[in-house]
Image (cartoon, coloured by chain):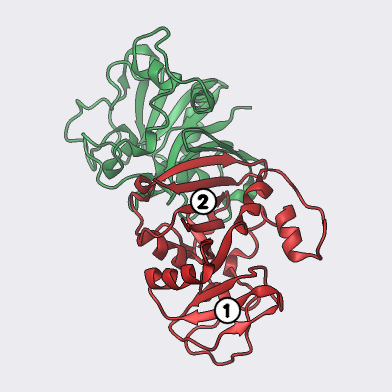
Chain colours: A green, B red
């Protein structure tokens, strides 16, 4: 049975999944890199970011969780704000995401937007498709493309929140980062009593973050 | 050196330290007992609530943290809403708190209120004093009474928040409970970048909660 999964989704203690004021230079707005400092030292991240082969990195609990993100995934769905900082109609179709010529997804990626545009085939198996669809519809398309593998909901906060509200998520890995952002986009709004639909497991880390895994009951 | 400590302070994932709509029957409003389910099974809680002597209870990580609350404490400061559900001038001075004749504090307790009233001496060494004071002033009074021992800031959320904002807290134990309350009183508001003043340690628990310890740098 194909599952719907969220991985490595960082939130601050005050519940923000990203900061305020996204720009080309600041994908997470005023949060800067504060939500993801736990991730950068991991082997999983260093392999994404660096050349192929063993490039070091930590292999403790943070990496154990981080590394789950790619296994068994056949497609991703992401919000438009994860894809880029533009809003409204596309002024410039040259933008191909933050990830360079060979993005780390290596699957079809469905970008939710009210302004569809032509698909973009990247190196390494990633193709960006742009669709204007509600969560359940988008999931149907992505599951078809995933060929029996799981579908990852890649963020940002409002995309994850909409899929949670629609009760479409089976596995949710949230990393609670002990920082206070004060403003930005909240993950948990409108999800009162969400926990009743999940079993929840908490694992602390020497880095100070907490890995929460929600598995649908 | 006398320290200022917070213990066993539960917050929801969306950052609420209590629910909305406190009443005599519902000290935590619509949150009910959801923020404290982790605490009730512990040996520490069962000893507070039950007869003296060994009365069972869990002795794992939740109890290890829970049990730190009383050691080395010489006085507590609490907000008026922790003491009772009344607001404004005291209509009825018969109210002596939620804890019966022998409250678990066994020290002087300073209740912050804009409506001071006569002190109440309880059984077992607890005396409630009512003072109208800013955090730093209240702390001075409590430290004097504590005779070199530590002072506990007992809650609720706005009291802890004010002491954090004034940078008066040395040790903060927060229990992140994997529930979404949706409304109530937020602990973290106005504390952007709080983490820069603390070292933070995270410990998960089989109960699903996370124990965060903030120790002032």
The image shows residue B157, relative to residue A127, as above or below, that is below
Asked if one can make out residue B145 in the rendered structure from this viewpoint, the answer is yes
Quadrant that contains the N terminus of chain A: top right
Pick the front one: A113 or A22:
A22
Q: Quadrant of the C terminus of chain A?
A: top right
Q: Taking A142 as reference, is B177 left or right?
A: right
In the displayed structure, would residue B184 be above or below residue A11? below
Residue A76 position in % (x across, y down) = 44, 28
Determine whether, in the image, residue A156 is placed left or right of residue B30: left
Q: Chain of mark 1?
A: B
Q: Earlier in the sequence, mark 1 or mark 2?
A: 2
Q: Nearer the viewer, residue B153 or B27?
A: B153
Residue extending furthest top?
A: A53
Q: Residue at x 46, y 43 (%)?
A: B200
Q: Secondary structure at mark 2?
A: loop
Nearest the eye: A148 or A70: A70
Residue placed under numbered mark 1 in the picture: B128
Within-10-Å neighbours for mark 1: few <14, some 14–19, many 20+: many
Q: Residue at the left extreme?
A: A91
Q: Is residue B117 left or right of residue A124?
A: right
The residue at 56%/56% (across/down) is B7
Q: Point out the residue furthest to the bottom here.
A: B91
Chain letter of the residue beneath label 2 in the structure image: B
- Judging by the rendered image, the residue that carries numbered circle 2 is B13
Could you confirm whether marks 1 and 2 are on the same chain? yes
Classify mark 1: helix, strand or loop: strand
């Amino acid at each position: 049975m194909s599952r719907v999964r969220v991985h490595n989704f960082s939130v601050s203690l005050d519940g923000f999944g990203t900061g305020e004021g996204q720009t080309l230079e600041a994908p997470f707005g005023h949060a800067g890199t504060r939500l993801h400092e736990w991730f950068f030292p991991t082997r999983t991240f260093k392999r994404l970011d660096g050349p192929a082969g063993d490039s070091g990195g930590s292999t403790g609990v943070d990496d154990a969780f981080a590394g789950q993100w790619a296994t068994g995934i056949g497609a991703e769905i992401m919000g438009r704000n994860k894809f880029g900082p533009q809003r409204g109609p596309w002024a410039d179709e040259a933008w191909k995401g933050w990830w360079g010529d060979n993005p780390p997804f290596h699957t079809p990626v469905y970008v939710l937007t009210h302004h569809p545009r032509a698909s973009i085939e990247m190196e390494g198996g990633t193709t960006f498709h742009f669709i204007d669809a509600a969560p359940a519809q988008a999931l149907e398309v992505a599951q078809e493309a995933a060929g029996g593998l799981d579908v990852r909901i890649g963020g940002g906060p409002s995309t994850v929140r909409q899929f949670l509200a629609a009760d479409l998520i089976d596995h949710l890995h949230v990393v609670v980062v002990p920082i206070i952002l004060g403003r930005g986009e909240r993950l948990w709004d409108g999800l009162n009593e969400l926990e009743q639909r999940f079993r929840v497991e908490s694992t602390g880390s020497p880095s100070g973050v907490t890995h929460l895994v929600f598995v649908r009951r």
